Image (cartoon, rainbow, N blue to C red):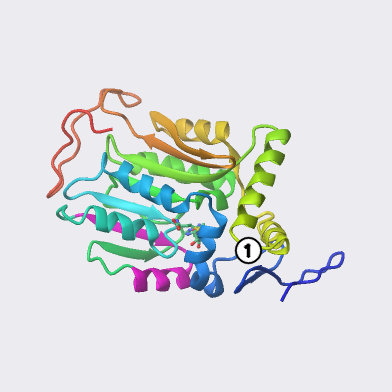
Amino acid sequence: MTGKRTNGDKTLGNVDETISAVPGEWRFNEEVSQAFDSHVRKSVPFYDEIQRMVVELSEYFVGDGSMVYDLGSSTGETLYRLADYHSGKENLQLTGVEVSEAMIEEARRKVQAPSVGFRHNNILDVELSPAPDLVTSVFTLQFLRLAERRRLLRRLAESLVEGGALILLEKTRGDSPAFEDMWTELYWDFKRRQGLSPEEVLEKASSLRGVLNPLTMEENMALLQQSGFSRVEPFFKWYNWAGFLAVKNHSLAAPAGGVAGPEPERPGHPPAEGDRG
Ligand SMILES: C[S@@+](CC[C@H](N)C(=O)[O-])C[C@H]1O[C@@H](n2cnc3c(N)ncnc32)[C@H](O)[C@@H]1O
């Protein structure tokens, strides 16, 4: 079914074969969760390569006894890969935080590794305890309002262990209207190459109005630095899609207000030696 809309009239429109949505009301509901793994690959350029990069970057921050949170874990793709890659580590805990119950159900079906658990929580409210060595968030913070994003990033920077990191993937906005137009057109070409129809591409864009809140590259970088991350570097960029690695108190940098002390010891998690970040 393709929706028909007249002025002021909101009608369901198709955004993929089995997914429909209303303008301005994109939701990660049961219909989306069931088709998510296929839909996300038609919607996010280099999705599998991005997931692979997240996992290889994690090697610098994850050891025996590490705590990892994935914020907005959807069907658990990142945790599934992290659990597999780090299966030789001892006492590793990988926790997905997800507000959609339907997504958590799919994730529990897909990810059976004993190191992985899920919390049905809003990421704005979740308790990040035990302290994380690594937080990943793949295309989720873009759904928060600026003030919420700022609050969460501050809390993440506070909660992470010294030398711990955030791996953040975001849909971004072009720095100027000209770039924004180019990135959007080229992104829509990508979606057409994945087999989505022009109507589906437009219906998805209108369903995301007011729901998706992308920032520019510069705004993302500034926000991470203002939130307390001492080193921030983009590691991925494809038109309006980007990845950032943000490290807390890199071991060579003194934390604000003092000199970096040793990390608190945790069972199975010896203090970081030398340059981990
Ligand atoms: C685009 S998907 C993330 C994709 C996923 N991280 C992956 O790698 O495939 C965004 C997810 O974030 C979740 N989400 C959005 N806002 C949230 C919030 N405030 N708290 C928890 N989860 C949230 C959505 O339910 C959805 O599952």
Residue 123 higher or lower than 58, as above or below: below
Residue 63 image position (x, y, % from top left): 19, 45
Kindly identify the residue that appears in the image at 41 percent across and 32 percent down. Answer: 228
103 in magenta: yes
In the shown orientation, is residue 191 left or right of residue 251?
right
Q: Quadrant of the C terminus?
A: top left
Kindly identify the residue that appears in the image at 47 percent across and 45 percent down. Answer: 169
Relative depth, front residue between 214 and 58:
58
Residue at the spot of label 1: 26
In the shown orientation, is residue 63 left or right of residue 34?
left
Residue 27 higher or lower than 193, as above or below: below
Residue 185 image position (x, y, % from top left): 69, 46
Place residue 262 in its image quadrant.
Answer: top left
Residue 243 image position (x, y, % from top left): 46, 41
Relative depth, front residue between 69 and 175:
175
| Residue type marked 1 | Trp
In the current view of this chain or complex, which residue is farthest to the right?
A: 7
Relative depth, front residue between 35 and 66:
35
12 in magenta: no
Q: Which residues are magenta?
A: 92-110
Relative depth, front residue between 213 and 123:
213
Residue 6 image position (x, y, % from top left): 86, 67
Q: Quadrant of the N terminus?
A: bottom right
